[in-house]
Image (tube, rainbow, N blue to C red):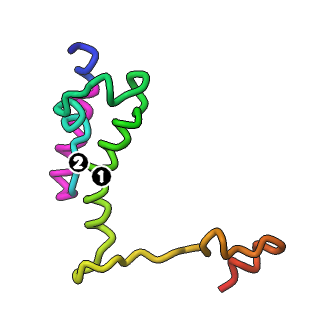
């Protein structure tokens, strides 16, 4: 477990900092460690495998959804730029004019 000593300390500090600032946090370090599929979650020990990416997505999506909804539960995000298919390919700058 020596290899995980520093990352575990770092993750604990991140979680403690978020809690002290009253910010929601997902302890990915703990979630991944408790999952039980250790080697299966990473393709090279550092980068997510498909299974790791799916676990990350499953854990983080509820937090994202909670932050982008108003008090009625409706999505409050708006597009800053046009949808890619709506961009004028001949003169893209025309698509950015308000």
| Element type at mark 2 | loop
| Element type at mark 1 | helix
Left or right: 97, with 60 as reference point: right
> Based on the displayed image, in which of its 4 quarters is residue 55 positioned?
top left
| x and y, in percent, of residue 4 in the image | 25, 21
Residue 76 numbered tag: none
| x and y, in percent, of residue 60 in the image | 29, 52
- At label 2, counting other C-alpha atoms closer than 10 Å, the crowd grade (few under 14, some 14-19, many 20 or more) is some
Of pointers 2 and 1, the one earlier in the residue sequence: 2
Asked if the magenta segment contains residue 11, the reply would be: yes
Going by the picture, which residue comes out furthest to the top? Answer: 2
Identified at 38% across, 41% down, the residue is 53
Asked if the magenta segment contains residue 95, the reply would be: no
The residue tagged 1 is 60
- At label 1, counting other C-alpha atoms closer than 10 Å, the crowd grade (few under 14, some 14-19, many 20 or more) is some
The residue tagged 2 is 26
Instruction: Name the mark nearer the viewer: 2 or 1.
Output: 1
Task: Give the overall secondary structure of the magenta segment.
Answer: helix
Q: Is residue 85 above or below residue 44?
A: below
> Based on the displayed image, in which of its 4 quarters is residue 76 positioned?
bottom left
Which quadrant would the N terminus be assigned to in this image? top left
Q: Is residue 55 above or below residue 94?
A: above
Q: CA distance from mark 2 to mark 1?
A: 7 Å
Q: Magenta part of the protein: which range? A: 7-23
Query: Nearest the camera: 27 or 40?
Result: 40
Q: Are marks 2 and 1 in contact (CB under 8 Å)?
A: yes
| x and y, in percent, of residue 94 in the image | 76, 80
| x and y, in percent, of residue 40 in the image | 32, 26
């Amino acid at each position: 477990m020596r290899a995980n000593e520093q990352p575990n300390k770092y993750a604990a500090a991140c979680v403690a900092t978020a809690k002290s600032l009253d910010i929601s946090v997902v302890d990915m370090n703990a979630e991944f460690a408790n999952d039980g599929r250790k080697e299966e979650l990473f393709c090279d020990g550092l980068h997510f495998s498909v299974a790791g990416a799916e676990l990350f997505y499953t854990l983080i999506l509820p937090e994202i959804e909670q932050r982008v909804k108003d008090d009625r539960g409706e999505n409050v995000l708006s597009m800053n730029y046009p949808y890619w298919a709506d961009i004028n390919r001949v003169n893209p700058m025309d698509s950015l004019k308000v």
